[in-house]
């Protein structure tokens, strides 16, 4: 390195080149600097994992997307490293290229290398996508079907039988068996939402007036997070859902238990719930509450959150939501119940929390 620097002495150079040279000289200092930068940036890698990361896939389509991402990243990094390497090479050696040499450099480094790499990446992506898409949009006969409707601002989830009839309804939570393809039928009654479970696959819009299909297959059991990926109003950012990928046997057990679920265990709680008119908007299997405007509350106690991923499903948080939903979730359509006595709000919250 020192030799290289010495060769430059005495040549007329611009001050800018001086600064550039000093910046890359000094023995081991650049190595320390690079190490320090990598160490400082390493916490960012933590964001590559988690319940909502497309880079930490738990499903078949998401794995293909993550692989594509990393292949693209490596391809891009090779081109970047090549260009930066050439820059340093030229700056250090103070090389002057002949017209022919410069032409060769531009031809190979600027045209051939990037073209070959980009063509390879494009071919890979083009090869990968048709392999994924038809598989996921294939005939859904014999596959489990779940209809998900984007509401403002929550998710209506209906499990369908083979004939397309609703077996039961729930909200803000999707359960799927691992190792099996599940077809999601995606709808919206009013505005466009986008259904996205990053760990399982790509997103799909929910468009009023049409039904979109998305087939996903979870590979790893776990609890993941899904989100709305299309701005849909004031509480768009508060519109999440939970995905439980379960072993097939556990899933079947849950599916059967869920069909037998009723809300009659706590008669006094149910009585208050009905007396204050909650049943006009919410349904609870086995009770007189048959409303369909708001989320179905059958087995509500087993859900992880209140208000579509907004609050933890705890008694005091349910009470807080009942008192003033709009304060928790702007423009939520549920009316507030702050006029009810605290004791009754608490009683209803306890009733809901106890629903299994
Ligand atoms: Cu629903 Cu954004």
Image: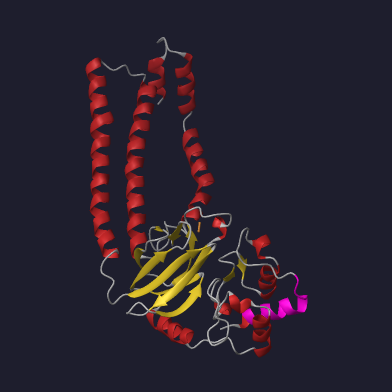
Lateral position of residue 103 relative to residue 159, left or right:
left
Q: Tell me if residue 263 comes above or below residue 14 in the rendering.
A: below
Q: Tell me if residue 195 comes above or below residue 337 in the rendering.
A: above
Residue range (magenta): 339-352
Q: Tell me if residue 33 comes above or below residue 160 in the rendering.
A: above
Specify whether residue 153 is in view: yes
Specify whether residue 50 is in view: no
The quadrant where residue 59 appears = bottom left
Q: Nearer the viewer, residue 162 or 176?
A: 162
Lateral position of residue 105 relative to residue 295, left or right:
left
Q: Is residue 3 magenta?
A: no
Q: Is residue 344 magenta?
A: yes
Q: Tell me if residue 17 comes above or below residue 214 in the rendering.
A: above
Residue 345: horizontal and vertical position, in percent? 72, 76
Residue 56: horizontal and vertical position, in percent? 42, 60
Q: Residue at x 38, y 67 (%)?
A: 185
The quadrant where residue 280 appears = bottom right
Q: Residue at x 74, y 79 (%)?
A: 344
The quadrant where residue 91 appears = top left
Residue 137: horizontal and vertical position, in percent? 29, 64
Lateral position of residue 337 relative to residue 156, left or right:
right
Residue 268: horizontal and vertical position, in percent? 68, 88
Q: Residue at x 36, y 36 (%)?
A: 80
Q: Nearer the viewer, residue 11 or 207?
A: 207
Question: What secondary structure is the stretch in magenta mostly built from?
Answer: helix
């Amino acid at each position: 390195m020192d030799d290289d620097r010495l060769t430059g002495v005495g040549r007329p150079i611009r001050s800018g080149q001086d600064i550039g040279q000093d910046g890359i000289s000094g023995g081991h200092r650049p190595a320390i600097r690079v190490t320090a930068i990598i160490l400082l940036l390493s916490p960012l890698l933590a964001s590559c994992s988690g319940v909502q990361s497309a880079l930490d896939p738990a499903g078949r389509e998401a794995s293909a997307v993550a692989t594509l991402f990393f292949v693209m990243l490596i391809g891009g990094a090779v081109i970047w490293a090549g260009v930066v390497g050439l820059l340093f090479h030229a700056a250090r050696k103070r090389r002057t290229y002949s017209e022919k040499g410069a032409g060769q450099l531009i031809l190979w480094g600027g045209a051939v290398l990037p073209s070959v790499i980009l063509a390879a990446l494009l071919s890979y992506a083009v090869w990968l996508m048709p392999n994924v898409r038809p598989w996921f949009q294939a005939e859904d006969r014999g596959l489990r079907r779940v209809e998900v409707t984007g509401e403002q601002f929550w998710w209506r989830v209906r499990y369908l039988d083979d004939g397309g009839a609703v077996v039961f309804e729930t909200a803000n939570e999707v359960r799927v068996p691992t190792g099996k393809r599940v077809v999601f039928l995606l709808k919206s009654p009013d505005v466009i939402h986008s259904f996205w479970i990053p760990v399982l696959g790509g997103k799909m819009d929910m468009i009023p007036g049409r039904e979109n299909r998305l087939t996903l297959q979870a590979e790893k059991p776990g609890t993941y997070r899904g989100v709305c990926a299309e701005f849909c109003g004031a509480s768009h950012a508060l519109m999440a859902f939970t995905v439980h990928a379960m072993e097939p046997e556990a899933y079947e057990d849950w599916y059967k238990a869920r069909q037998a679920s009723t809300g009659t265990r706590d008669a006094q709680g149910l009585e208050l719930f009905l007396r204050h008119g909650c049943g006009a908007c919410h349904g609870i299997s086995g009770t007189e509450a048959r409303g369909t405007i708001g989320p179905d509350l059958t087995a509500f106690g087993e859900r992880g959150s209140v208000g579509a991923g907004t609050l933890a499903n705890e008694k005091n948080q349910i009470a807080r939501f009942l008192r003033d939903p709009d304060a928790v979730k702007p423009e939520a359509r549920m009316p507030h119940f702050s006029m009810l006595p605290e004791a009754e709000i608490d009683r209803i919250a306890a009733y809901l929390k106890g629903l299994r």
